[in-house]
Amino acid sequence: MKTMKSVVCTKYGTPDVLQIQEIKKPIPKDNEILVRIISTAVNSGDTRVRGLAVEGFMKIIMQLVLGFSKPRKPILGTVYAGIVEEVGAKVLKFKKGDSVFGMTGFNFGTYAEYIAIKEKGNISLMPVNATYDEAVSLIFGGQTAIYFIEKAKLSKKKSQKVLVIGATGSVGAAALQIAQYYSADVTVVCSSDGKDFVENLGISKIILYDKEDFTKHNNQYDFIFDAVGKTTKKQCQHLLKTEGVYKTVGGLEYASESHQQLEFLKMLFENGKLKATIDRIYSFESVVEAHEYVDTGRKKGNVILKVSE
Ligand SMILES: NC(=O)c1ccc[n+]([C@@H]2O[C@H](COP(=O)([O-])OP(=O)(O)OC[C@H]3O[C@@H](n4cnc5c(N)ncnc54)[C@H](OP(=O)(O)O)[C@@H]3O)[C@@H](O)[C@H]2O)c1
């Protein structure tokens, strides 16, 4: 039996529940592609699952969906960038040697050397100008941001004033860039630690939440996106124009991912409209440290887990 290295989540808990283990290497079915993963990322969603970090009745819902004392799918990780190593007999879109990137969502499984993916899944050729680390960093925040921005119909509206709260996270950094792509006038809320980060992404209207309370401002926005889930609509209502839209990642609305979103991210990156935001890169063996860092809730952009060179 051929094996591969993987990170197994042995139970819900602190980062040390993660163990590196040899497991069976997948064999692609006729409609699947075997990807040798070069880079994955440790996202806030991964650490939330590992720690079962949700409040109240959501904990029960999460256990029903994911497993009671440990995840039923014990290899965490939802994003990957890598090289097609084998294709199933019926695969038409991809060939051996292609560089691809994608998201597995609730199927998880990307903290591993290999993954078998359905050809028609959420997978695309990588942006031609991206490294594997850059490509993988675009996905989690990018797909989430696109979902909420589409809900607000930003692409269909002109001269929009947008406020992004939590602009330095994976989701916020993608959201502010995509809002700028749609020619919105973007103001962001972040900490003093994140000021240089957002300036590097072309933002000049910055409210530092450790220096001033943005809810005391009287600016009016067409779209307020709380990309870190720290506010409620009620707290922001007075900042919304009459037809204004408020969205938060912190409520019961969950982003769904699609192949179209991935193609959109590829186009944006290839055209210089979206920058990859990479905070730290950890080796596969340092997955516990990577989770400890993401657990702080203070990362700027994305944390990469290097599966192989
Ligand atoms: N609903 C959904 O479908 C969905 C999808 C994806 C993610 N999420 C959730 O969205 C949240 C953000 O995800 P992420 O991956 O972007 O997180 P992340 O990358 O871990 O980033 C969090 C960022 O928020 C900043 N921050 C912390 N407190 C803040 C505050 N009070 N105001 C403004 N910024 C603040 C942090 O920097 P400083 O500490 O320096 O400010 C950090 O840069 C997570 O809770 C995640 O679970 C929800």
Image (tube, rainbow, N blue to C red):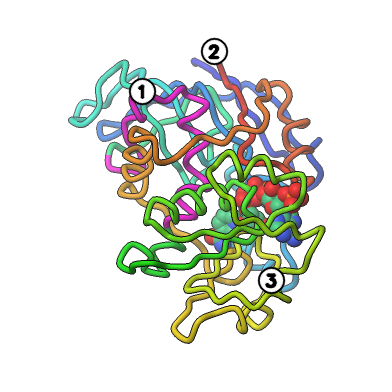
Q: Is residue 279 above or below residue 148?
A: above
Q: Is residue 274 above or below residue 68?
A: above
- Image quadrant, ligand 1: bottom right
Residue 198 locus on image (x, y percent): 61, 45
Q: Is residue 57 magenta?
A: no
Residue at image point 37% right, 28% down = 100
Is residue 70 in sight in this rendering? no
Q: Indicate which label's residue lies in the foreground, 3 or 2.
A: 3
C-alpha gap between disc 3 and disc 2: 40 Å
**Amino acid type of the residue tagged 1 in the rendering:** Ser
Residue 96 locus on image (x, y percent): 29, 17
Would you identify the image quadrant in which residue 146 lies?
A: bottom left
Q: Which residue is mark 2?
A: 309
How many residues crowd mark 2 within 10 Å: few (<14), some (14–19), many (20+)? few
Residue at image point 18% right, 30% down = 92
Q: Which residues are magenta?
A: 120-146
Q: Which residue is mark 1?
A: 99
Would you identify the image quadrant in which residue 32 lies?
A: top left
C-alpha gap between disc 3 and disc 1: 39 Å
Residue 240 locus on image (x, y percent): 55, 79
In the rendered picture of this protein, how many numbered marks are placed on residues?
3
